[in-house]
Image: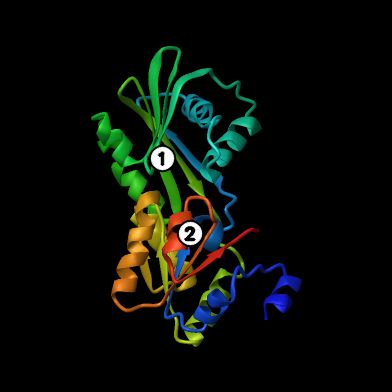
Amino acid sequence: GVGKAAEYGILIRNGEALQQAGNITTVVLDKTGTVTEGKPAVTTIESVRGLDENEVLLIAASLEAGSEHPLAQAVLNAATEKQLALGNVENFKAVSGQGVTGEINNQLTMLGNIKLMQSESIDVSSLKSRVSELAKLGQTPMYVARDKQLMGLIAVADPVKQDSKLAIERLHNIGIKVVMLTGDNKHTAAAVAKQVNIDEVIAEVMPQDKADKVASLQQGNEVVAMVGDGINDAPALARADVGFAIGS
């Protein structure tokens, strides 16, 4: 079995993993790059207080220049298409599960979710309903702020892989429950889950907490497989009864 799998580019680390794979009752899927393509694109840019949308995009792209996250790449691609010259960022900081911050022209700038904005007491009420609208469409909205003032938002969408729905259907057909575990906001996650008929969604989970969610499923007597990209998901892949790391 291990030799046959290798012909298809599937590497099985040990016989025990193969044996245990036959006992799985629940499969936990990461969202970005597993259920979705992992090639997000910017779908919406909105500004507040009459600011220029390009200025909102410029700040976001300048901040994301140092990041390797798939959402960062989408923002950078959008700025490249508009031929924007990126600003110089000092004191760049990635805040796990929240976003990024840095100083541009000695002004504190931020790009991230509601938790990041709340940490600096930034008022986002003017865009709150718009953010939930976009999330329900399966887009991931991110707030942009400068000098503790909201500037606007950027939303990114990541299309579902063509074969995700069929793969999940096949898991259902052999009696396996499918759970999606993601750091994305709950409305976006629910919209994606609905497209592919996922049974349960656990959203807004910090990368370091994913393994704990897997453990709590195991405590409910589930034999759990975790499917992820192997970077953010490494602890959860290790904690699961069987870990599937998607290479490509």
Residue 37 lies left or right of residue 171; in this view the side is: right
Callout 2 crowding tier (Cα within 10 Å): few <14, some 14–19, many ≥20:
many
Residue 3 lies left or right of residue 240; in this view the side is: right
* 14 up-or-down from 99: above or below: below
Disc 2 designates what residue? 31
Residue at left 44%, top 72%? 241
Which circle, 2 or 1, is nearer the viewer?
A: 2
Q: Which mark is residue 142?
A: 1
Q: Position of residue 34 (x, y in %)?
A: 54, 61
Residue at left 29%, top 40%? 115
Q: Residue furthest top?
A: 106
Mark 2 or mark 1: which comes first in sequence? 2
> What whole-number distance in Å separates the C-alpha atoms at marks 2 and 1?
17 Å
Residue at left 53%, top 38%? 72
Place residue 116 in its image quadrant. Answer: top left
User: Which quadrant of the figure contains the C terminus?
Assistant: bottom right
Residue type at numbered disc 1: Met
Q: Which element carries disc 1, helix, strand or loop? A: strand
Callout 1 crowding tier (Cα within 10 Å): few <14, some 14–19, many ≥20:
many
Q: Position of residue 151 (x, y in %)?
A: 38, 27
> How many numbered tags mark residues here?
2
User: Which quadrant of the figure contains the N terminus?
Assistant: bottom right
Q: Position of residue 18 (x, y in %)?
A: 57, 78
Q: Position of residue 109 (x, y in %)?
A: 40, 24
Camera-nearest residue between 5 and 15: 15
Place residue 182 in its image quadrant. Answer: bottom left
The colour scheme applied to this rendered structure is rainbow
Residue type at numbered disc 2: Lys
Q: Which element carries disc 2, helix, strand or loop? A: helix
* 32 up-or-down from 215: above or below: above
